[in-house]
Image (spheres, rainbow, N blue to C red):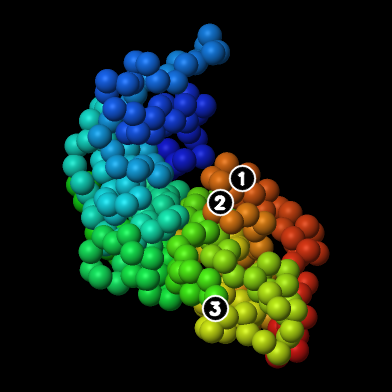
Amino acid sequence: MRGPGLRGVSVAIVTMFVAMLAAVTIVPEQAAAQGPEMLHPRLDVRTVVSGLNQPTSMAFLGPNDFLVLEKATGKVQRVVNGAIAATVLDLAVNSNSERGLLGIALHPDFPANPGVYLFWTESTTGADSGVVSNVPLLGNRVDQFVWTGATLAFDHNLIRLRAFQADPGQPLRGNHDGGVLEFGPDGKLYLFMGDNGRRGQMQNLPCGWSGDCAMADDQFGGPQPDDAHLTGVILRLNDDGSAPMDNPFFAAGAASVTGWPAATHAGWKDTVKHLVKVMPVEYRQVLAKQHLDTEAARLASV
C-alpha cells in the first residue's frame, strides 16, 4: 500500500497550509482584520491548526493526520483533527538565517515501510541555537527515522552536507541551505541543497570564484565537488542513501556524484517537484549537456 505522499496534495490542501502559516504569524485579535481573502468562488480559506512555531513543511500520515516541522524548535509536531496532538521528535537544530528543520518526505511505500526522512541543520551545542557559528562544517544532514505509530525513532544518516560559511573578509552566514526532500515516481529520494555561498564547479565555475584554477574555493578546499562543496545541487539517492547505479557517471566510479546543478539558492518545493517528475526521463539528454560534461572530463583525467 502506498502512502499519500506530498505529490498527491491538492490545491485545496496547499491553500489550507498557507492559511495555517498565516495563523501562526497573526495574533487572534488581528486575525479577522488581517486574514487572507479568497477571491475565487470555488475555493475557501480556513485555519487548519494554530499554535505552531515557524512551520516549514508537512507530510500526511492519513486523513486529518499529518506531521509538521518547526524550523527553529527542531520539533516534529503531529496534528490530528486540527489540533497539535503530540511532539513526536525534538532535534537540536541550528536555525540561524535559513537553517533549521527544513524538509520531510515519507517513504513511497509508507506505512508498509515506515521510513520518514528529514532534512535539518545540526547544532554543535546539543540544544537549539540561533548562533551562526554553532554548526559543524557538514551541519546540514538528511536522516531516516522510523515511524512507530507514536514517535519518530532514529534509524541512520543518509548524507551530510555543507552548513558552515566563513569566507575571508565577510561575516559568518547561515543562508542558502535548500532543504526540500521528495520521492520521485522512480522510487528515488531527491533532495535539494542550496549553494551555501559556494562558487565552485557545481555552479559551472571550473576554477571557482577567482577564475584561478590554482586557488581553492575556500579554506576547506574546492572548487571540486567534494564533501564540503557538494552544494547548489539536486541529489538523487536510493532510499538507504546510496547512489543509484543509473545516476550519471556511476559506472565511471563516481558513486558520490549523484545529482544535477540547480540554479537556485534556497529552493522552491514546486520547482523541485517538477524537476523530480521529468528527471528520470530527460536528465541524460538535457542536464548532461549543461553541467555534467565538466565533471565527466574531470573524472576521465583521474
Residue in the picture at 57% in, 84% down? 221
Kind of element beneath mark 1: helix
Can you give x and y, in whole percent of width and height, for residue 135 in the image?
A: 36, 70
Residues packed near mark 2 inside 10 Å, few (<14), some (14 to 19) or many (20 plus): many
Q: Is residue 274 visible?
A: yes
Residues 71 and 210: in front is 210
Tell us which disc is closer to us: 3 or 1: 3
Q: Work out whether 219 lies above or below 116.
A: below
User: Nearer the N terminus, badge 2 or badge 3?
Assistant: 3
Q: Amino acid at mark 2?
A: Gly
Residue in the picture at 73% in, 85% down? 213
Q: Which quarter of the rendered picture does the C terminus lie within? A: bottom right
Tell us which disc is closer to us: 1 or 2: 2
Q: Which mark is residue 271?
A: 1
Q: Work out whether 85 lies above or below 19.
A: below
Kind of element beneath mark 2: loop
**Is residue 193 found left or right of 66 in the rendered image?**
right
Q: Which mark is residue 168?
A: 3
Q: Are marks 1 and 2 in contact (CB under 8 Å)?
A: yes
Q: Amino acid at mark 1?
A: Thr
Q: Which mark is residue 267?
A: 2
User: Nearer the N terminus, badge 3 or badge 1?
Assistant: 3
Residue in the picture at 71% in, 83% down? 299
Q: Is residue 59 visible?
A: no
Residue in the picture at 40% in, 45% down? 56
Residues 63 and 128: in front is 128
